[in-house]
Image (cartoon, rainbow, N blue to C red):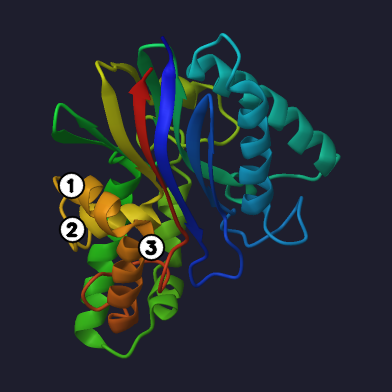
Amino acid sequence: MKIDIKDYKLLCHKGSGEYNEDIVRVCKYGAWILDGSTGLNKKNLISKESDAKWYVSWWDKYLYENINKDKSLKTIVCEGIENIKQEYLSTLAGIRLEKLDMPSASVAIVKFYKDKVEYFLLGDCTIVINDTNENIILKDDGVCKFDNMIFEKMKKLNNNNKSLSVKDKKDILLPYIIENRLKKNSEEGYWILEFDELAVEKSMHDYISINDELKLIISSDGFSCAYDRYNIFSVENIIQIVEENGIEYVNDKVRKLEHEDKNGLIFPRFKESDDSSCAYLHITKK
């Protein structure tokens, strides 16, 4: 007996930024979402386009080549961090780095076994699981907690000047954003995929048994905002909505809301629209 992918749907759309720094992939051994973030010093030290795009592309290739190995996702990710750190530092060839220079990523990974699924989460990517007709959402709120502090400050700026763009407000509040970013991968901050193996021990990680079938959605926050921030849909019905209407339908609703609220008056945010990625999976035993 083994797991069979009965159906799957993928989406990976660029937001209002110059590059798409998300990646999504499904293979016969598992699936993953990577949501990259370039350093706040606005330096591209390793790529002509975006260090975050380089970073998630490296991880996508690495996971594709290693997820089939007889190792847990925590071990696979730990070994990946060691490898990418060596490659990153050797490519920089002695360039002095600050903490704000380094690219990072939120990540959600699922790995298939004969009768179970393993999951691994770091950052603000999301997994929604439908098991025995109940939807369960898995998400680390560490990043969101610090983002929400900035969003509250943006609301105060909105009260004083409703014509400020999302970018204007981000620029004004950049010192606070930098303060938060400096707390990544620390006990007083949040945990994310970067170059620190300790973050792996702080990940959300577990196994889910499969009786007959399992439906799940893995997504970056640019897609999950449809049901965990904007409340366009609920967690309880999001899998049904995707099955009946498709992933593009959900993404279009998000983009419509963001366009109508382009200055972030209703929903403060860091970009007019974020990169949006999602994978819907319906897996069964056969």
The crowd level at tag 1 (other Cα within 10 Å; few <14, some 14-19, many 20+) is some
Q: Distance between the residues labelled 2 and 3?
A: 14 Å
Residue 46 spot, x, y in % from top left: 76, 50
Numbered-mark total: 3
The residue that mark 1 highlights is 235
Q: Which one is in front, 35 or 171?
A: 35
Q: Tell me which numbered mark, 2 or 3, is placed earlier along the sequence.
A: 2
Q: Distance between the residues labelled 1 and 3?
A: 17 Å
Quadrant, the C terminus: top left
Q: What residue type is labelled 2?
A: Phe
The residue that mark 2 highlights is 233
Q: Tag 3, which secondary structure? A: helix
Q: Is residue 198 left or right of residue 234?
A: right
> Residue 149, located in which quarter of the rendered image?
bottom left
Q: Which amino acid does label 1 sit on?
A: Val
Residue 132 spot, x, y in % from top left: 15, 26
Q: Nearer the viewer, mark 1 or mark 3?
A: 3
Q: Do the residues labelled 1 and 2 touch (CB within 8 Å)?
A: no
Q: Tag 1, which secondary structure? A: loop
The residue that mark 3 highlights is 248
Q: Which amino acid does label 3 sit on?
A: Glu
Quadrant, the N terminus: top left
Residue lying at 34% horizontally and 80% vertically, measured from the top left: 259
Residue 228 spot, x, y in % from top left: 22, 52
Residue 282 spot, x, y in % from top left: 34, 35
> Residue 204, located in which quarter of the rendered image?
top left
Q: Tag 2, which secondary structure? A: loop
Outermost front residue: 286
The crowd level at tag 2 (other Cα within 10 Å; few <14, some 14-19, many 20+) is some
Q: Distance between the residues labelled 1 and 2?
A: 7 Å
Q: Which one is in front, 121 or 31?
A: 31
